[in-house]
Image (tube, rainbow, N blue to C red):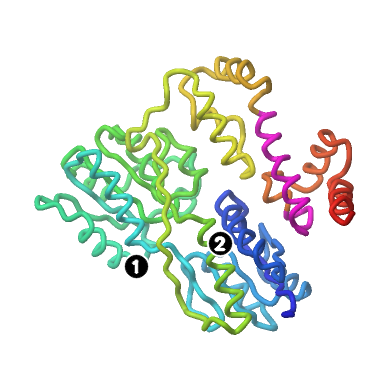
Amino acid sequence: MAEALKIALVSSYWSRMEHRFLAGALNYADSHPRVVIRVFAPCNDMAATANEVERWGANGVFGVIESPDLDQLVAAQSKPVHIVNFGGSNEFSNVTTIVGEFKYFLKKAIAHLHQLELRSFGLFSFEEAGSNHKIFVDQFIQEVQPANFQGGNLILPVPKEIAINPDADVRPVPEALVKWLRDFPKPAGIICTHFRCGNYLVRCCNALGVSVPKDVAIVASDYPDFCLSCAPTLTSIMPSMEMLGTEAARLLVGILRGTEKPPRKVLVESAELIVRESTGRRRPDNCDIPGALAYIHTNATRGISVEQVFRETQRVSKPTFHNYFREATGKSPAQAIRDRQLEEVRRLLTSSDLPLDSISKLCGFSCSHVMARTFRASEFMSPRDYRKRHKHKLSV
């Protein structure tokens, strides 16, 4: 029997994006019991993380690591192991980059904008998109393909402190962006290719008095938190992180087992479109309890708040939502989120050997201590005791 492979998941951040990536990898590991996954995230010091990963004895690494952090991680490895990483990076002999295929991303975004019967189309990127921008533009023009194509593309340098802070003041809006938006035949559809790009564009439109989505409909590739933190909320198209996590784990295990040659880059046809207000979706005017419950079921284990549930699914007042929710379910939205989290905790305790730290992250808790306290209040025993009791029953 082959020895168990120890794989480390490394990331500087721990958002729903990384959570879904790990969930996909665990789906793969569920059917390959000789694969052990441990989470090293969020990481503030990549050199220190590299040492921790080596002390644990990891055979390989996969993760969601941006370029500067990946450079540091590779440089700090005294015993280099293969890395499968989601996102752009410099080329290293021991790193495989896995990404969603941009052409597939474009097809879904443009199909959605075509349904809105828009007159013109645009592609907006930050300057850091770099050499990939020409590839993006060429594929964009090829996919749009109307006989009377009107539109264009803009690549813009934006200070990172403004781009990453959804509350930062975007004024004065760069003159190039002002002219670009002014010259578009309206209504227009704009696709944003870079993380944080869509949120920034919405803020600029608000500052300029450009109506979103009446004048400009926006599809972004932002993180969910950035999509929900602006008004109107952003329609987003992102890679299916579960699919990428599964593929990353499968590929890394194949490389480590010697059944796969380590490629430099892997493109996966993977994209999920979530329609929000920036392309015209209206939330129900009445209290939408089924929508709230569906949102909680899908997202509770990603660390969502009641405010996010309300903002994403309702158009009524908060007191009305809370009253109707309790009347329909017998519990508060916060209790519904907690119950869904605990449901997933019980599943992972009884179906995996994951450490409690990893389970707490997978189930949306801030730390294992909070998870344990919440679990004990519900089950009247600790997570460890619950796991032992279940395993004892199975062995009997």
Q: What is the x, y in percent for residue 88?
A: 46, 68
Q: Nearer the viewer, residue 83 or 190?
A: 83
How far apart, in angstroms, are the residues tagged by discs 1 and 2? 23 Å
**Which amino acid, by three-letter code, is at mark 1?**
Asn
Q: Is residue 140 above or below residue 162?
A: below
Answer with left or right where residue 299 lies relative to residue 330: left
Residue drawn 53% across the image and 84% down it: 93
387 to the left or right of 274:
right
* Secondary-structure class at tag 1: helix
- Element type at mark 2: helix
- Magenta-tinted stretch: 334-358
Residue 209 position, x and y percent, is: 29, 32
Whether residue 345 is in magenta: the answer is yes
* Farthest-out residue, left: 148
- Residue closest to the eye, 265 or 2: 2
Q: Along the horizontal axis of the image, is 26 left or right of 153?
A: right
Give the residue number, with chain letter if any, for mark 2: 245
Disc 1: which residue: 132
Residue nearer the viewer, 15 or 51: 15
Q: Is residue 90 above or below residue 270?
A: below
Amino acid carrying mark 2 in the image = Gly
Contact? badges 1 and 2 (CB < 8 Å): no
Q: Is label 1 or label 2 in front?
A: 2
Task: Specify whether residue 227 is painted magenta.
Answer: no
Instruction: Tell me what residue is drawn at x 55 percent, y 73 percent.
Output: 251
Q: Position of residue 108 (x, y in %)?
A: 33, 51
Q: Please tell me which residue is depicted at 45% across the width and 72% down the height of the picture.
A: 266
Q: In this rendered view, identify the residue nearer to me: 307 or 390.
A: 390
Q: Magenta segment, principal secondary structure?
A: helix
**Which quadrant: the C terminus?**
bottom right
Tell whether 157 sits left or right of 74.
left
Residue 115's place in the image compared with 34, above or below, is above
